[in-house]
Image (cartoon, rainbow, N blue to C red):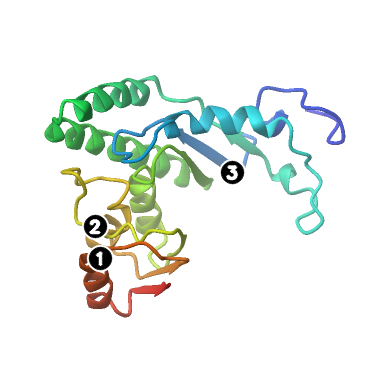
Amino acid sequence: MKFDPNGSAEFDGIFGLPYDLEDSKLILLPVPWEATTSYGGGTSKGPSAILQASYQVDLFDLGLGNFYEAGIFMLKESKQVKTWNQKAKLAAKKKSTKEVNDLSVKVNEYTYSETKKLLDQDKIVGLVGGDHSCPMGTIQAYVEKYPNLGILHFDAHADMRKAYQGFTDSHASIMYNVITKTKLQKLVQVGIRDFCQEEMDFIRTKEGRVFAFF
């Protein structure tokens, strides 16, 4: 489908692009989830906000050229994930950690299955969250397909807590879960400046797999 890359966004796709799932190499998976956020809120609205903001972004890039011609497509937000998010946020307010943990597992299973399905189609999958816990299933699927995969993690926090506020799939535990539940060979963390003693001890025990730059 022809369109003017120099004009304003003409289509509903991410960045106003006209591509669909079949035409695109990069598929963005939105995950409107924020049940374990511990300060502020609103991250579940991130995917829709990013989609709307993308219409204001020019496609021209000095370094990458016409990168968009490979095709970029953003999937629709899952109504099921939205429902799980609403239930989990209510459960969190009621201090029902088990319900939140059970729903978190469902989100992980969803992102895993969706990512695996797309990787099997030779797509590149990018996850758009949501809180930091969202990528767990996606990372699992990637590590299975690409055993030599490494992760470069930019964050102020190590996210290496075994659990936080009773949530085992907390935003503060994502990298702990990645290290303990997948066969990821290398995690490089950059910009870390806010972490607890337990996290530091864990990082030290994983020397050779985890490289943290503080």
Q: CA distance from mark 1 to mark 3?
A: 34 Å
Provide the secondary structure element on which disc 2 rests. Answer: loop
- In which quadrant will I find the N terminus? top right
Which residue is label 1 attached to? 199
The answer to which of 162 and 63 lies nearer the viewer is: 162
- The residue lying at 26 percent from left, 77 percent from top is 204
Outermost residue to the bottom: 208
Residue visible at 32% across and 26% down in the picture? 85
Which label belongs to residue 26?
A: 3
Residue at the image position 68 percent from the left and 31 percent from the top: 19
- Expressed as whole percent of the image width and height from the top left, the position of residue 13 reads 65, 27
Which of 212/7 is in front? 212
Say which of marks 1 and 3 sits in front.
1
Instruction: Specify whether 155 is left or right of 83.
Output: right
Q: What is the secondary structure assignment of the residue under circle 1?
A: helix
Between discs 1 and 2, the one toward the N terminus: 2
Disc 1 to disc 2: CB gap under 8 Å: yes
Residue denoted by label 2? 161
Count residues near mark 1 (Cα–Cα under 10 Å), then give few for <14, some for 14-19, many for 20+. some
Q: Image quadrant of residue 8?
A: top right
- Residue 72 in view, yes or no: yes
Looking at the rendered image, the quarter that the C terminus falls into is: bottom left
Quadrant of the image occupied by residue 44: top left
Which circle's residue, 2 or 3, is located before the other in the chain?
3
The image quarter containing residue 201 is: bottom left
Secondary structure at badge 3 equals strand
- Which three-letter amino acid code belongs to the residue tagged 1? Glu
User: Residue 175 placed where, x, y %?
Assistant: 32, 58
